[in-house]
Image (cartoon, coloured by chain):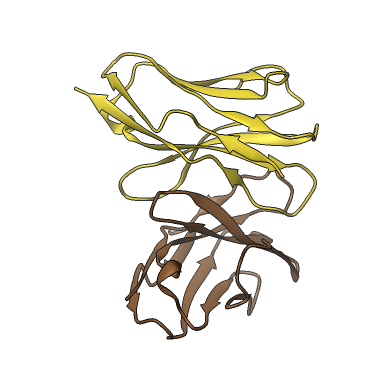
Amino acid sequence: AQTVTQSQPEMSVQEAETVTLSCTYDTSESDYYLFWYKQPPSRQMILVIRQEAYKQQNATENRFSVNFQKAAKSFSLKISDSQLGDAAMYFCAYRLGGVADGLTFGKGTHLIIQP
Amino acid sequence: DTAVSQTPKYLVTQMGNDKSIKCEQNLGHDTMYWYKQDSKKFLKIMFSYNNKELIINETVPNRFSPKSPDKAHLNLHINSLELGDSAVYFCASSQDSDAIYEQYFGPGTRLTVT
């Protein structure tokens, strides 16, 4: 079974600084997708960024970027110019390609933004 | 317009009762899901439903059953509620079952069993 590990239960960063959230996963498959979801206090799940395993180029969405290291099975999220609205739980997730299955989530990292 | 909606948002009930949570999506998606988020915020897939094909996570008790009256709805029925069923339940949908398609989540239903 696939597993996703987020080793940082909580992270804190000063506003406008950069923070990196870690994620590792375990799989023997080659066709899969990785995601970062944000869950603010409103509890709504919001997709932040997505990475296809077959793509070598790291995904980027505005201030959010990933460092995808396929051989190391690592998928970290970098948030640049942190803003107060970035404060939330961040979940790393994995999904196997080609099957009708759900997301496998990590346990989450609580990100605190210090003003 | 709300893409994925759930009713109710909060549900408080007693052990042993039977309850349902409704989910509707207006995105025209073919695949819907139910996730459970426990008190430690851990999210776990319960069901995937696509074109009448149901994939069940083997850890889900058979007291839980999804029912889809049509493509836009996937309701969750829970029989004989237990204290451990207290959690936030999220419905989600995606255009198709392939992993390339983004899953859109509903706002969640917080279930409290007393």
* Quarter of the figure with residue A73: top right
Q: Nearer the viewer, residue A73 or B52?
A: A73
Q: Nearer the viewer, residue B82 or A96?
A: B82
Locate residue A51, reporting x and y percent. Answer: 64, 29
Locate residue A10, reporting x and y percent. Answer: 35, 30
* Quarter of the figure with residue A27: top right
Name which residue lies at 31% across and 33% down.
A87
Residue at the extreme front of the image, as rendered: B83
Chain letter, brown: B
Locate residue A89, reporting x and y percent. Answer: 39, 38
Q: Is residue B98 above or below residue A18?
A: below
Name which residue lies at 73% across and 18% down.
A71
Chain letter, yellow: A
Locate residue A35, reporting x and y percent. Answer: 58, 35
Classify residue B55 as left or right of residue B25.
right
Q: Is residue A6 above or below residue A74?
A: below
Name which residue lies at 55% across and 28% down.
A23
